[in-house]
Image: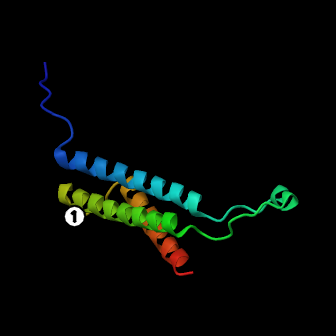
Amino acid sequence: MFNDRRKGPDYLAKILTLTSIVGWLLILIALIFLFVSQPEMDTGIVRYRGIEIRDYWLAGWRNAAFIFMVLSSVSSVIAWFVHRKRSRRASDLPGSMVITLALFSFIGVFILVRLLSH
């Protein structure tokens, strides 16, 4: 009886979703790189066996994590601007995932800048 004229999300909504997904994947990759680059854990069994451990950060992995975190920040800013372009009202706020992505990525960049300065 009723003709459904909706064709699904427009291209800006698809770009918004894609940039958010890319941003979260970049944060995940940065966290994996940070896990690999961190100093090894000094446990009792390691001390007992006399195994040498690395007590410093691996600079290459840490720098790569910084690059991925900056790219995630750029992705969140792009998602924010796409949402601003797509919204019809000036009072519309971006979705909670875009705000959370921006918050996590900017905090991550700040933490990595502090880590790189040591």
Q: Residue at x 38, y 61 (%)?
A: 72
- Neighbour tally class for label 1: few under 14, some 14-19, many 20 plus, Cα within 10 Å: few
SS class, disc 1: loop
Most distant residue in the bottom direction: 117
Q: Vertical placement of 117 versus 74: above or below?
A: below
Q: Residue at x 11, y 24 (%)?
A: 3
Which residue is label 1 attached to?
Answer: 90
- Residue 23 lies, in percent from the top left, at 37, 55
Q: How many marks?
A: 1
Q: Vertical placement of 110 versus 42: above or below?
A: below
Quarter of the picture holding the N terminus: top left
Q: Vertical placement of 59 versus 98: above or below?
A: below
- Residue 68 lies, in percent from the top left, at 41, 61
Quarter of the picture holding the C terminus: bottom right
Q: Residue at x 81, y 58 (%)?
A: 46
- Residue 34 lies, in percent from the top left, at 54, 61
Q: Residue at x 43, y 68 (%)?
A: 106
Of the pair 9 and 5, the residue shown nearer to us: 9
Circle 1: residue type: Ala
